[in-house]
Amino acid sequence: MPDQITGTLVFTVFTAVLGSFQFGYDIGVINAPQQVIISHYSQVLGIPLDDRKAVNNHPMESTPELPTTPSPGNPTPTPWAEEESVASSGIITMFWSLSVSSFAVGGMIASFFGGWLGDKLGRIKALLVANILSLAGALLMGFSKLGPSHILIISGRGVSGLYCGLISGLVPMYIGEIATTFRGAIGALHQLAIVTGILISQIIGLDFLLGNHELWHILLSLSAVPAVLQSLLLLFCPESPRYLYIKLDEEDKAKKSLRLRGGADVTKDIAEMRKEREEASSEQKVSIIQLFTNSSYRQPILVALMLHMAQQFSGINAIFYYSTGIFRTAGLSQPVYATIGVGAINTVFTALSVFLVEKAGRRSLFLIGMSGMFVCAIFMSVGLVLLDKLTWMSYVSMTAIFLFVSFFEIGPGPIPWFMVAEFFSQGPRPAALAIAAFSNWTCNFIVALCFPYIADFCGPYVFFLFAGVVLAFTLFTFFKVPETKGKSFEEIAAEFRKNRGSGQAPKAAIEMKFLGATETV
């Protein structure tokens, strides 16, 4: 491997993270045009705007009272008319929730197959195949005005989720294998590209750009642009040398791939990969079921799942998906600009976390991030509850949202992926990463689907609920999660043994003694 960043390496990594950029774009694109799309749904479904009690507003907003004074053009509503109005608004809310959450369903399904597809076809061909799904999802949403919009958007979001589920494993795998020398910093570009995609989607989703009644379908379909660009650029990218050598046993092609990145002498790299292949072949693969039935793996996998649940149930995606409505509730006339501010803060602190993760402990940063999010969630809800009495409370809520996102990216955002890779050796690691990714996407889906209903039920108190969840996960982390940075695998095993009160060292950590702990996802 080269000891410096070469032009070919920069080109290859840029091409790969275009997939991560699409991932972020698909996450954020549904946010800004929320009201426009809801309005279009009402037209397609034949639900008049005046009959939709709870649709024009975000679920946390107070819904307007139906008029009770009779007039020639507006008679007193009968109970059945009110029930029909509520039912109609419920249908719109259901379709909007599905438009957001079907993306996570696709990701949840595909998360199991990213690694398998990469091993079956190779990293380059797997990314090309994944882009077919990206293009299909973009086309469904791009033509949504020509058919039943709600069905096409929900389907398109689901197909785009399939794509994102695949690349959430493929991209980190590929760039981690193509850039050994700078794996930590370059691997973090995956997360940075995601939040950049979120920010760009929010900017071009402004009403005077594409987030309006005429062009919203173009906004949703624009993920096709980076998909096409990436497909073209991938034709000029080298295949992963680790895939060529370890999976295909093609040493000559692996050497050629190494030299394309500027390395003259690749003997050391080939020797390292030979050792890795021998260790991988000597270690038995572990199934998902064995992770939970074998006592050696049970505690590490449960801790890994809890970290991913903490990441998703913290409330961060409620802000990413519904921040426009939350800011409108806080009293902003142009909430979309505040949403863009959230995206910018998210991007800045993601870049900062690249340096912090390498300098501070994983567990320490996770605890700092979760503790900060707990305090911010409290202030967020207090601000929303007192907004009617004290108008300046809107600034409290908005500041809390910005800080909430900042604390998330300091720790709970990137760290669960680091730690799962460090808990397990080559044998159980693929299964552990697959189940962790599935858990992450499943929790993402639950939040996306249920948040409008929870917010409708709890009103401005909803973030008190998230604060309680964050507090519970913070306590769990404090008592059950070991620090992994700078520790040998025997030391990690000792921490797990101490936490579970057993004298048996977990094989999940001991078997990793010959492997580095720098692999990230």
Image (cartoon, rainbow, N blue to C red):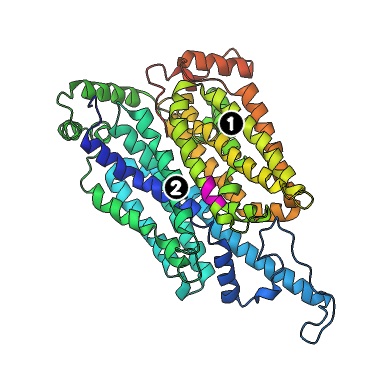
**Residue most extreme to the bottom:** 72
Q: Secondary structure at mark 2?
A: helix
Tell me the distance, in whole angstroms, between the alpha carbons under discs 2 and 1: 26 Å
Residues rendered magenta in the picture: 338-342
Q: Amino acid at mark 2?
A: Gly
Q: Residue 295 versus residue 240: which sits nearer the camera?
A: 240
Query: Which quadrant does the N terminus fall into?
Result: top left
Q: Are marks 2 and 1 in contact (CB under 8 Å)?
A: no
Q: Which residue is mark 1?
A: 369
The mark found on residue 165 in the picture is: 2
Q: Is residue 368 shown left or right of residue 187?
A: right
- In percent of the image, x 63 and y 35: which residue is there? 373
Outermost residue, right side:
69
Relative to residue 280, is residue 158 drawn left or right?
right
Is any atom of residue 115 visible in this view?
A: no
Residue that sits furthest to the front in the current view = 392
Magenta-drawn stretch, dominant element (helix, strand or loop): helix
